[in-house]
Amino acid sequence: MAKYSSVLKPSLTESNKVCRLNWALQSVKDIDGAKFFDPMFDTVHVDENWFTVHVDEKWFFMSRIQKKVYGAPGEKIKQRSCKSKRHLLKVMFLSAVARPRWDDNKEEWFDGKIGMWHFTETVPAQRRSS
């Protein structure tokens, strides 16, 4: 017996492919007739994205439906349970990153990682007002 894993791949329509291509072409800059891809780290030229901070929210499931667990022979594995696998809890994190750059004050590289903050709060359920 062998263990296999299957990875989901996006099924893109033609309009999805065109939108993705246009988005990628927005990162190509024209400098003195030459085309340059504008990566997220510092570039030689100064542009409007030099001091940009990228902020994005990320959603994570608290648990997965199927999870691989390895144990020693004879070890009893703890059984995981939930009320419904259709309603798994999700948490949201806000992350902020910027371009890596040299910090003259500290005389070291700033790696661009600003922070990641969670937006979770435990509160009792509210009753419906009817």
Image: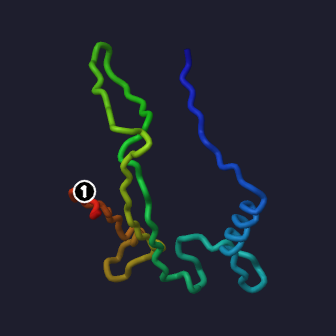
Where residue 129 sits in the image (x, y, percent)? Answer: 27, 64
Instruction: Say how many tags the image has.
Output: 1
Comparing 79 with 96, the one in front is: 79
Disc 1 residue crowd, few under 14, some 14–19, many 20+, Cα 10 Å: few
The image quadrant where one finds the C terminus is: bottom left
Q: Residue at x 31, y 19 (%)?
A: 72
**Which picture quadrant has residue 43?**
bottom right
Q: Residue at x 37, y 62 (%)?
A: 93
Where residue 103 sits in the image (x, y, percent)? Answer: 38, 78
**Which picture quadrant has residue 86?**
top left
For this orientation, the residue located farthest to the left is 124
Above or below residue 124? Residue 30 is below
Name the amino acid, label 1: Ala
Comparing 81 with 128, the one in front is: 128
Identify the residue under disc 1. 125
Q: Residue at x 38, y 39 (%)?
A: 84
Indicate left or right for 56 with 114 as reference: right
**Which picture quadrant has residue 34?**
bottom right
Where residue 20 sits in the image (x, y, percent)? Answer: 69, 64
Where residue 82 sits in the image (x, y, percent)? Answer: 33, 37
